[in-house]
Image (cartoon, grey):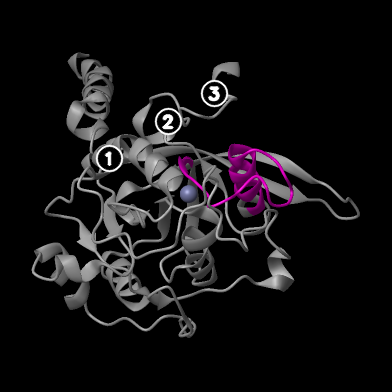
């Protein structure tokens, strides 16, 4: 009769183990609320599709794109300043949960040439990519150009380079490094190179790539570690849609506010490239909004 006690005791012990902090913390999956836009057959519109995904943080990288220390456009530089704290928050929280952080300040990685995080990227063992990486260049790195068949054209006209200041800024070489407001920790890596990024991901068995930073209509889509290239390489890519910005001048088509312009490009990504989520899924804080966003108070 005494043995009857054993079964409930085992159940209690198992429950205690599952609820214990060690079982709950590090290995807990990231719970992402993914938003995509899907066109059903025979319909002209894309419907919003929300999906929950549980993602293993150990198989996930977070790439920080082009969060430089300065920008030739004063408005763009000011908005990067606003994004810096919230991006550092998401980087810190993601890192603590086991996500691999890649800092990608394009064209200025030489600033970090003696840092172990830069050498880690250069020394990761070569891994063959499943398709040739783009070799054509733009703005100091290889570039994944728009894929007209897949995505048509961007919904905003950035052919003037997108300065939205009242007095137009002159294009100059403005950046020298990543903004010091985003901490680079021991376990992180620094690269702006497509092959190095691929090697780092292969070395760690990483299938999921989250990306944040600027500017969505240009570098976040086009860099060799950016959305187009990562999606084409078969990674499960997610854009943190509140932690990005565009180069878009409202005087250009389609003539909407700067912030509506950014939302249009987010929609474009959700339609043709990958789902998005907000930083809330990582930090449990309210999604980021820019101070000048006239819609910020409406919500
Ligand atoms: Zn400007």
The residue drawn where x is 29% and y is 42% is 94
Mark nearest the camera among 3 and 1 is: 3
What element does badge 2 sit on? helix
Which labelled disc corresponds to residue 296? 3
> Which sits in the foreground, 58 or 248?
248
How many marks the image carries: the answer is: 3
Q: Is mark 2 within 8 Å of ligand 1?
A: no
Q: Is residue 29 visible?
A: no
Mark nearest the camera among 2 and 1 is: 1
Which labelled disc corresponds to residue 280? 2
From the top left corner, tell me how far across and down residue 148 is, in percent. Answer: 71, 71
Measured Cα–Cα span from mark 2 to mark 3: 16 Å
- Label 1: which residue? 88
36 left or right of 13 in image: right
Q: Callout 3: 10 Å neighbours few (<14), some, many (20+)?
A: few
Mark nearest the camera among 2 and 3 is: 3
Measured Cα–Cα span from mark 2 to mark 1: 13 Å
> Which sits in the foreground, 264 or 185?
264
The residue drawn where x is 23% and y is 63% is 190
Q: Is residue 57 magenta?
A: no
Whichever of labels 3 and 1 marks the residue nearer the N terminus, that label is: 1
Q: Is residue 15 visible?
A: yes
263 left or right of 205 in image: right
From the top left corner, tell me how far across and down residue 132 is, in percent. Answer: 48, 85
> Which sits in the foreground, 178 or 223?
178
Q: Is residue 135 above or below residue 3?
A: below
The residue drawn where x is 20% and y is 26% is 20
Span shown in magenta = 242-268
Measured Cα–Cα span from mark 3 to mark 1: 21 Å
> Which sits in the foreground, 209 or 30?
209
């Amino acid at each position: 009769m005494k043995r009857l006690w054993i079964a409930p005791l085992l159940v209690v012990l198992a429950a205690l183990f599952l609820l214990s902090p060690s079982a709950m913390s590090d290995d807990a999956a990231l719970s992402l609320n993914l938003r995509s836009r899907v066109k059903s057959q025979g319909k002209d519109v894309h419907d919003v599709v929300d999906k929950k995904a549980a993602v293993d943080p150990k198989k996930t990288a977070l790439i920080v794109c082009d969060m430089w220390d300065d920008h030739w456009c004063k408005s763009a530089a000011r908005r990067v300043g606003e994004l810096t704290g919230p991006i550092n928050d998401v980087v810190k929280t993601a890192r603590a949960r086991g996500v691999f952080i890649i800092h990608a300040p394009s064209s200025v990685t030489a600033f970090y040439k003696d840092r172990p995080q830069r050498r880690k990227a250069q020394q990761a063992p070569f891994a063959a990519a499943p398709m040739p990486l783009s070799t054509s260049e733009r703005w100091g790195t290889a570039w994944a150009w728009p894929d007209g068949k897949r995505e048509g054209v961007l919904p905003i006209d950035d052919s003037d380079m997108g300065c939205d200041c009242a007095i137009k800024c002159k294009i100059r070489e403005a950046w020298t490094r990543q903004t010091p407001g985003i901490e680079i920790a021991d376990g992180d890596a620094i690269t702006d190179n497509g092959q190095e990024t691929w090697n780092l991901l292969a070395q760690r068995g990483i299938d999921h790539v989250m990306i944040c930073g600027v500017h969505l209509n240009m570098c976040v889509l086009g860099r060799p570690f950016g959305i187009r290239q990562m999606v084409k390489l078969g990674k499960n890519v997610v854009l943190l849609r509140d932690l990005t910005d565009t180069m878009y001048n409202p005087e250009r088509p389609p003539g909407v506010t700067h912030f509506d312009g950014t939302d249009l490009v987010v929609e474009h990504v959700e339609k043709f490239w990958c789902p998005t989520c907000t930083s809330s899924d990582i930090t449990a804080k309210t999604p980021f909004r820019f101070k000048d966003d006239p819609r910020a108070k409406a919500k």
